[in-house]
Image (cartoon, rainbow, N blue to C red):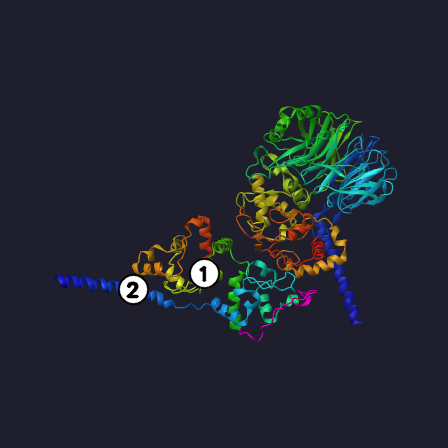
């Protein structure tokens, strides 16, 4: 009699655990590796050799004694803004090696750059170019259409080092063995929706390193505690104002990339 | 044949259209008898106003010469008859004048021509012109008549000129935008009021060496300077700008107060600022300042409240002499001290915009030029009552633009008349060189006052872009100053600021080769990306890494580069004192134009070009 009750309890427990585990694994496995335009763009940039001159991930170019500034421009920071008026000109830089506007005035007039920008026309498909531009935009934050709160939030993210794990402008892709998704989720990707239900949860992620909902779920907690890279808690490093700006930035990113 | 006929017809049609258009314009805006003059920069045509800016009494005491800034003329008045007896044409934008000691010549500074026009009084015409620095303002001949001291307000210098040959003997760099000059009675020094540098320069006229640049504390927008006969005391008219604190309340002069600064020339560094305000009524925008020949009375024109202050000089100096260094600050914060102690009183000027004043000792009268009334009022020098107002020409109806200019200079639209728009933007709607902590973009982040000349076509307004466009900014300005914006004033101020009057840019005619090279470098450095012609701004907010921990934002509105040759200091918090330092010191990350690899020569060329915009 006692045995039957014990077995019943045991089976029940196993079934419950199994269900919970299956649910969490389903959550974990459905994502797989994300494929966003920005991530595809990064692969294209690597394949075309962009990083050879513009630096790893386009962050900070190599030395060029022929150039006025002494370096090939990186894509990061606002310097790129002084090379191109708009995205069309960036396109011209990639395809023709210089934008039409500067063809006449000669940007390197009197002092030719030692390392001229190659022209990729005919070596890149229009889809590849589109993806590459999304990645470029993520690295450079090119463009001024970003609203004030989101821009300041971007600076907060930069100061806290968020982009180290999340990639430039949070495009994701760093692998994270043992975590819920197996990789660091993109801020603008599909996995994000499952991990972050609303702004309140986003704040919990930022401030505590995990949201209350997943922390209280034993199976999810197993992954949160077991993952290789643990999301740090930034509560002690952020003011309320900064947190709000950071949330505004991530929200803005999700809105513009859809 | 048919081609020629067509051309002829087209030409005739063009002429008829132009005449019709001109007539329409004439009918709309000009009262009978008015002279129509369309301006080059597209400002609405309006009657020519005289805008008397200064007056001097001829040494014979019988006539007065009035410098008319906007009609390019000098009106000659018979003081006793109260009539205009002649009007002498002079160079563009005359602003100040002084007689040679023998009274035979009148030296007129022509702001827009960079020269002093010499009027032969007997002949009643300009007999020669002396080239000086850029935008000469104050001019004073030495007591011996052999030399001329000229303040070049745009070159930031004072020139000593040989009156005979017109040759410049020395040119001394003084403070930012100097305005007036006075000679010490023994000829040992000349005193220059540095308009925006909060200082008084004391220069040795012989060697041209600056002996001392006396700090005047919070005094700002310095105007006329005078020296007592004993050579000991210098008086400078000006306002007191509390840019060190938040611009939250104007009561008791917490933003601006108004008066003059007294400096003891025998004690280096000494100065006491005294205020002509009253507890509930500021004495906005002191301008002209004269001493009676016996140094017992001083007159200060208060151009923003249209009043004249009459100051008891011995009593005033008693107060100054008794002041210890510890008293200097409490004294300059006591807005009603001169009124309470009955050292000064204020009387009506008899017209709008009193600027230049002169004392007619022979008739015991004070002559006041009313810039906006186109008149000279005659005040009893002892009582201050207005004895007569002499119009300088037939009455002209005020155009909307002119009304806007008046409002801009008028403290009556400000609560308790503490200041006018000009207290931060000067009478030409440009800059005062100071950083102001306005509450519209959060507190604790002071920003450099911007020139208003470019606001009309470069939205948004303000460094932080907190006003969507100029209309909103002007309305906010009205609320800031007077709490309730009125649509009439809004319309006039918009008309004035919507067609700003730009001074001729002297840099455009200089060093054409360097300018040509600089134009190319402007593109090479990528300047034209964010500062594209014709407005020289992309109207966007950019982050150049110039934000400080005190700023609430990292991006600032890209300013137009037009007239940047005269709007310094530069960058949002005025950190660049020279155009060169913008690139040499404040562009370490190469974000503000790719100037990192520039040689000294290339930087010079770039600046030469930027100055012409």
B176 w.r.t. A87: above or below: above
Residue at horizontal 27 percent and vertical 65 percent from the top: A19
Quadrant for the C terminus of chain A, please: bottom left
In the image, which disc is placed on residue A165? Answer: 1
The magenta segment is A103-125
Q: Is residue B515 visible?
A: yes
- Dot 2: chain letter: A
Extreme-bottom residue of the structure: A122
In the image, which disc is placed on residue A21? Answer: 2
Residue B16, image x and y in percent? 75, 59
Examine the structure image and report whether residue B7 is included in the region drawn in magenta: no
Q: Earlier in the sequence, mark 1 or mark 2?
A: 2
Report how far apart the C-alphas of labels 1 and 2 lie in the structure: 27 Å
- Dot 1: chain letter: A
- Between B123 and A63, the one nearer to me in the picture: A63
- Between A44 and B368, the one nearer to me in the picture: A44
- Classify residue A169 as left or right of residue B12: left
Q: Give the mark toward the camera: 1 or 2.
A: 1
Residue A241, image x and y in percent? 46, 49
Helix, strand or loop status at disc 1: helix
In the image, which disc is placed on residue B231? Answer: none
- Classify residue B413 as left or right of residue B503: left
Residue B472, image x and y in percent? 57, 48
A139 w.r.t. B453: above or below: below
**Circle 2 Cα neighbour tier, 10 Å, few/some/many (<14 / 14–19 / ≥20):** some
Quadrant for the N terminus of chain A, please: bottom left
Residue at horizontal 57 percent and vertical 53 percent from the top: B545
């Amino acid at each position: 009699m006692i045995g039957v009750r014990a077995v019943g309890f045991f089976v029940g427990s196993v079934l419950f655990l199994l269900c919970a585990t299956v649910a969490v694994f389903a959550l974990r496995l459905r994502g797989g590796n994300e494929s966003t335009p920005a991530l595809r763009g990064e692969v294209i940039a690597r394949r075309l050799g962009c990083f050879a001159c513009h630096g790893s991930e386009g962050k900070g170019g190599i030395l060029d004694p022929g150039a006025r500034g002494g370096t090939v421009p990186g894509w990061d920071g606002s310097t790129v803004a002084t090379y191109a008026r708009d995205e069309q000109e960036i396109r011209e830089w990639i395809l023709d090696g210089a934008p039409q506007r500067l063809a006449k005035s000669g940007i390197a007039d009197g002092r030719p750059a030692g390392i001229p920008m190659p022209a990729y026309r005919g070596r890149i498909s229009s889809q590849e170019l589109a993806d590459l531009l999304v990645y470029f935009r993520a690295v450079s934050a090119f463009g001024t259409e970003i609203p004030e709160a989101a821009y300041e939030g971007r600076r907060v993210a930069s100061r806290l080092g968020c982009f180290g794990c999340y990639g430039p402008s949070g495009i994701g892709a760093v692998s994270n063995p043992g975590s819920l998704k197996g990789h660091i989720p993109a801020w603008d990707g599909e996995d994000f929706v499952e991990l972050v239900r609303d702004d309140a949860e986003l704040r919990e992620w930022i401030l505590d390193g995990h949201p209350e909902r997943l922390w209280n779920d034993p199976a999810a907690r197993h992954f949160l505690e077991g993952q290789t890279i643990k999301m740090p808690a930034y509560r002690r490093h952020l003011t309320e104002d900064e947190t709000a700006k950071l949330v505004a930035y991530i929200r803005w990113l999700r809105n513009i990339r859809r | 044949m048919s081609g020629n006929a067509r051309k002829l017809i087209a030409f005739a049609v063009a002429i008829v259209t132009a005449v019709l258009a001109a007539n329409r314009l004439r009918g709309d805006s000009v009262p009978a008898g008015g002279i129509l003059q369309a301006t080059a920069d597209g400002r609405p045509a309006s009657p020519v106003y005289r805008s008397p800016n200064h007056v001097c009494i001829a040494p014979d005491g019988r006539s007065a010469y009035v410098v008319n800034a906007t009609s390019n003329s000098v009106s000659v008045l018979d003081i006793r008859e109260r009539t205009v007896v002649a009007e002498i044409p002079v160079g563009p934008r005359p602003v100040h004048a002084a007689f040679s000691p023998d009274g035979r010549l009148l030296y007129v500074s022509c702001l827009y021509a960079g020269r002093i026009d010499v009027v032969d009084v007997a002949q009643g015409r300009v007999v020669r012109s002396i080239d000086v620095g850029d935008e000469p303002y104050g001019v004073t001949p030495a007591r011996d008549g052999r030399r001329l001291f000229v303040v070049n307000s745009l070159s930031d210098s004072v020139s000593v000129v040989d009156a005979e040959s017109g040759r410049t003997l020395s040119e001394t760099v003084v403070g930012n935008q100097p305005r007036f000059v006075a000679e010490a009675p023994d000829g040992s020094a000349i005193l220059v009021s540095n308009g925006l540098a909060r200082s008084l320069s004391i220069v040795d006229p012989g060697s041209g060496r600056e002996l001392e640049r006396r700090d005047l504390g919070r005094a700002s927008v310095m105007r006329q300077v005078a020296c007592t006969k004993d050579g000991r005391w210098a008086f400078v008219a000006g306002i007191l700008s509390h840019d060190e604190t938040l611009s939250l309340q104007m009561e008791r002069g917490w933003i601006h107060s108004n008066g003059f600064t007294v400096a003891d020339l025998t004690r280096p560094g000494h100065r006491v600022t005294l205020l002509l305000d009253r507890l509930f009524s500021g004495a906005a925008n002191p301008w002209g300042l004269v001493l009676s020949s016996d140094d017992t009375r001083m007159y200060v024109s208060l151009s923003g409240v249209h009043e004249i202050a009459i100051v008891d000089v011995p009593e005033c100096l008693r107060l100054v002499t008794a002041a210890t260094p510890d008293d200097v600050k409490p004294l300059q914060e006591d807005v009603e001290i001169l009124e309470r102690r009955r050292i000064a009183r204020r009387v009506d000027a008899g017209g709008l915009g009193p600027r230049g004043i002169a004392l007619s000792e022979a008739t015991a009268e004070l002559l006041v030029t009313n810039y906006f009334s186109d008149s000279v009022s005659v005040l009893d020098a002892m009582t201050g009552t207005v004895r007569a107002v002499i119009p300088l020409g037939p009455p002209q109806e005020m155009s909307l633009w002119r009304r806007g200019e008046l409002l801009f200079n008028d403290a009556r639209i400000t609560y308790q008349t503490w200041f006018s728009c000009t207290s931060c933007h000067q009478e030409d709607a440009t800059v005062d060189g100071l950083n102001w902590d306005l509450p519209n973009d959060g507190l604790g982040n002071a920003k450099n006052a911007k020139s208003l000349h470019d606001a009309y076509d470069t939205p948004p307004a303000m460094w932080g872009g907190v006003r969507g466009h100029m209309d909103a900014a002007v309305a906010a300005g009205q609320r800031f100053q007077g709490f309730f914006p009125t649509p009439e004033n809004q319309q006039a101020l918009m008309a004035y600021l919507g067609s700003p009057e730009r001074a001729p840019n002297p840099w455009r005619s200089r060093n054409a080769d360097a300018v040509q090279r600089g134009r190319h470098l402007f593109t090479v450095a990528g300047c034209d990306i964010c500062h594209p012609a014709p407005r020289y701004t992309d109207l966007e907010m950019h982050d150049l890494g110039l934000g400080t921990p005190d700023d609430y934002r990292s991006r600032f509105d890209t300013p137009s580069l037009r007239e940047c040759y005269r709007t310094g200091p530069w960058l949002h918090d005025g950190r660049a004192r020279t155009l060169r330092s913008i690139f040499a010191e404040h562009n370490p990350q190469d974000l503000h134009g790719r100037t990192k690899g520039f040689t000294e020569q290339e930087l010079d060329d770039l600046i030469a070009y930027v100055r012409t915009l």
